[in-house]
Every structure is written in C-alpha cells, then in structure tokens.
C-alpha cells in the first residue's frame, strides 16, 4: 500500500490536479492581484495540509513571495482563513438564490434546481469547499459566529423548499430538518473526494444528486420499517 504523503509543498500543490479548481473566482474583486493570489495559494495549502499545519511561508511560496509578504495584505493567517470561508459561504448562498426556480415552479422543480446548483458549486469549487467545511475550528469565536449565521440562512433556504413540498402534498410527510440535512451533506461531502478531471462533470453530479434528493421525498420512497412487497414469483416461494 502506498504511503500517504504527510505534507504537501507549494510545488506539490501547483503541480497536483487534485488541488486545482475554480476557487480563484470567489475572491472579492476589490482586492488587488497579490491578495487574491495569496488567497488562492492559501486555500490549496489549507485544503491539503490543514490550517494549523500551514505556515505563512507555505502560502507565500505558492506565489513566489517572501514569508513576510502576507502581512502586508492580511494582519494574520486566521484572517486569510476567514476571508476564504466567508467568501465561500457567501458565494454559494448567493448562487442558489440567484439561480433558484421561480416561485410559480412546482415544489419538485424548485428542489431539483436548488440541489443541482448547490452540488455544481461544491464540485466546481471543491478545494475551497473542503476548507469551508473542515477548517472552521481555525476561526476566532467572533468570525465563526459570523459564518455560522450564513450557514443557518443557507439551511433555511433549503428547508423552506422542502417544507413547501410537504405542505402542498408534492412530497411525503417527512422530518424536514433531518431530510434537509441529509441532502446538504451529499453535496458538501464532494469536497473530500471530487476532482475536476474525474468522470463526472459538476453539471452531471448536480443532476444525479437532484434525482437522489427527489427520491428522498417521493411518495413512492419506502417508509422505514415497512416490509417491501414481493412479486408473484417471490411470493410463491415463501412458505406459510
């Protein structure tokens, strides 16, 4: 069995397709070229090595700067992490809102749209998504609370769509909170394993995960504890 690399260098990250995505599109356009480049380098370092194991030298080496250059643009490494996590959460929330199905659409169409968009975003930005989900412990309490409120609002967007379908009879009677959490977890988990050079495009995964989400709320979905019906041949083989 091949040994897992303990730590990735800036050169490793630059050459490894596993750490390539579209995260550079997320940064605030009011920032200059150098701060945005530092954020792109940092998000790869944090995703590959973790926030605490990453040094400011690691981040700066990714853009061919000396170790102290980071502090010209960011007062601390934690503020770099906060900028990345806040941007990621804000962008995905805006993405699902901006591209949501119209209010006149059916509950099923609304759910399909929001799940597919959410999944596409996490696949296209899988490196940033990994940091957004798994490096939250590196934030200060104040910054964590700010991000947590964005996460709560994202959850509310999904719950409203699912609750609407339950209320109008499009979806079966379910625990909205639990089912919504399961739907979100499917997309979020992409950050652990997805690669852009893989066999599934972000759009293909979006459609596939939307199908899974609709199956969770379908009236035809099995109820926990129910015994599946047997077809004629199987029933004939069952002895009383």
Image (spheres, rainbow, N blue to C red):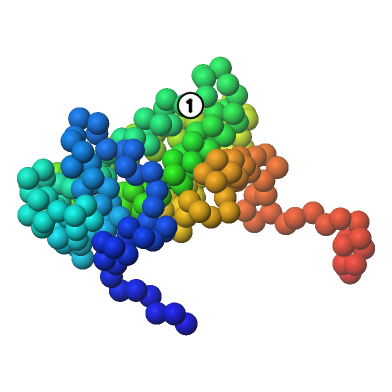
Is 128 on the left-hand or right-hand side of 236?
left
Question: Label 1 belongs to which residue?
Answer: 100
Q: Which residue of the protein is positioned furthest toward the top in this rendering?
A: 104
- Horizontally, residue 38 falls left or right of residue 114, namely left
**Snapshot quadrant of residue 14:** bottom left
Does residue 72 lie above or below 45 as drawn?
above
Nearer the observer, 74 or 105: 74
Question: In terms of depth relative to the viewer, which is nearer, 235 or 129?
Answer: 129
Q: Is residue 176 visible?
A: no
In this view, 96 is above or below 86: above
Q: Is residue 37 above or below residue 62?
A: above
Residue reaching furthest front?
64
Image point (19%, 58%), residue name: 61
Residue 41 percent across, percent down from the top left: 25, 52
What residue is at 48 percent from the left and 43 percent from the top?
119
Tell me the quarter of the picture where residue 29 sits. top left
Q: Out of 182 and 12, give the one closest to the viewer.
A: 12
Q: Is residue 7 visible?
A: yes
Callout 1: 10 Å neighbours few (<14), some, many (20+)?
some
Does dot 1 land on a helix, a strand or a loop?
loop
Q: Residue at x 64, y 56 (%)?
A: 225
The image quarter containing residue 125 is top left
Q: Position of residue 112 (x, y in %)?
A: 57, 34
Image quarter (top left, top right, bottom left or bottom right) of the C terminus: bottom right
Residue depicted at 48% across the width and 51% down the height: 196
x, y (%) of residue 223?
A: 65, 49
Residue 25 at x, y percent in the picture: 34, 38
Q: How many marks?
A: 1
């Amino acid at each position: 069995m091949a040994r897992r690399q303990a730590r990735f260098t800036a050169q490793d990250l630059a050459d490894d397709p596993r750490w390539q995505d579209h995260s550079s599109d997320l940064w605030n356009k009011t920032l200059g070229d150098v701060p945005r480049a530092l954020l792109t380098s940092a998000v790869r370092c944090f995703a590959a090595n973790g926030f605490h194991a990453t040094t400011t030298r690691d981040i700066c080496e990714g853009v061919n700067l000396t170790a102290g250059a980071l502090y010209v643009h960011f007062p601390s490494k934690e503020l770099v992490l906060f900028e990345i996590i806040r941007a990621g959460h804000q962008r995905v929330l805006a993405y699902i809102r901006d591209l949501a199905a119209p209010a006149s659409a059916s509950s099923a169409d609304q759910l399909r749209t929001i799940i597919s968009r959410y999944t596409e975003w996490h696949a296209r930005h899988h490196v940033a998504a990994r940091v957004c989900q798994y490096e939250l412990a590196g934030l200060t309490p104040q910054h964590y609370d700010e991000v947590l409120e964005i996460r709560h609002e994202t959850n509310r967007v999904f719950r409203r769509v699912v609750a609407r379908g339950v209320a109008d009879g499009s979806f079966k009677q379910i625990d909205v909170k639990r089912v919504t959490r399961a739907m979100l977890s499917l997309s979020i988990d992409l950050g652990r394993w997805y690669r852009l050079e893989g066999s599934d495009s972000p759009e293909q995964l979006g459609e596939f995960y939307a199908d899974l989400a609709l199956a969770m709320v379908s009236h035809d979905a099995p109820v926990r504890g129910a015994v599946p019906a047997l077809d004629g041949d199987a029933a004939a083989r069952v002895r009383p």
